[in-house]
Amino acid sequence: MVLVVVILFFKTTTINKILAGKPGPDLPLILKLQRIKMEIVYLRMKSTEETRSYHYTKYYPPKPLEEHVKFFYSFKSDSETMERVLPTGSSEITIRVNRPIAEDDILIVNPATTFMTEKPKDLGEIIGACFYPWGFHDLFKIPPSEVLNQKLLLADVVSPGFKKLLDLAKGECDNLSMIRTLQRYLLSRLSHKSNSIIRDAVNYINHQKGQLDLHILYKRYNISERRFQQLFKTSIGMTPKRYCLLKKFHSAVTLLTRQTNLTDLGLSLDYYDQAHFIHEFKSFAGICPSSLIKESNFLNEINAEAYF
């Protein structure tokens, strides 16, 4: 089996020319906001049975959205192999492109705490916006718990404002135009900054990779423990404890190889023993670590860099 990975980085000035031509004072605001970096990841896996390719482009958000949106992306693949997509702890909006846009082409996807299975080719050619854990709630004022671990029509979740996105998207069919359209829509939903306490708490947990005493976390903020837990769950869709466990799971996935000693790995992540580690791992992945390492889940190769 051979895996070829090509990563291309474009300077901001280069991508300006690609997206919007030469920037100038008379360009619409949205094109000025497209002064972004772009990363292209191309994956091709060859084996005796099949060849799979994955085309993935990441676009960093304009400044007004960067507190809420982690990045925008485009994706397509010819792989017909079912893949296990591990939980990311966040939400994303996806739009199927290169055909007239219909209501069922625009989805809210939230693989927050459990895995999903996907056949990459069936996703079609899509663009998406990946939110920070608090971003969906900030922009849509909808508790993430209402979409937790589901793939839903965006129209069913944000029905009052959905028509605006659908109207903006009509007539757009290529990736870059649709990303600009999605940016316009999300910019129209900006009303206030994200909660600084929740943003700081999530970043602190991420930095600690979930390995921390929650009482120390609670003492960082001048609010009661109960109030903090309420704010966190409302914004993120899960409790602080569950989010810490998720980040420990992410660490385990990135460290896992065929040679990994599971007892040593579990202990390094503060689990009591191997049985406890495997139990928690299965609660997120649906299978044990040794089974996951045998699967060819290249969607997770992409997600790991972005979320883990």
Image: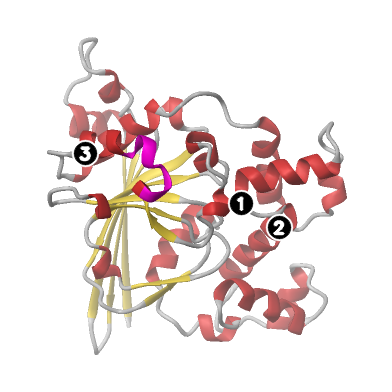
Q: Main secondary structure of the magenta part?
A: helix
Numbered range of the magenta stretch: 156-162
Residue that label 3 marks: 169
Q: Which residue is drawn at 70% across and 49% down?
A: 205
Q: Which residue is drawn at 52% across and 40% down?
A: 135
SS for callout 2? helix
Residue 189, above or below 121: above
Residue 202 rendering spot, x and y as whole percentages: 66, 45
Residue that label 1 marks: 237
Q: Quick check: 200 left or right of 120?
A: right
**Label 2 environment density (alpha carbons within 10 Å; few <14, some 14–19, many ≥20):** many
What is the CA distance from the residue labelled 2 to the residue labelled 1?
13 Å
Residue 263 rendering spot, x and y as whole percentages: 74, 82
Label 1 or label 3, whichever comes before in sequence order: 3
**Label 1 environment density (alpha carbons within 10 Å; few <14, some 14–19, many ≥20):** many
Tell me the amino acid under the disc marked 2: Cys
Q: Quick check: 300 left or right of 146?
A: left
Residue that label 2 marks: 244
Outermost residue on the top side: it is 25
Residue 210, above or below 291: above
Quadrant of the image containing the N terminus = bottom left
Circle 2 or circle 1, nearest the eye: 1
Q: Residue 161 colored magenta?
A: yes
What is the CA distance from the residue labelled 3 to the residue labelled 2?
37 Å
220 or 58, which is in the foreground?
220
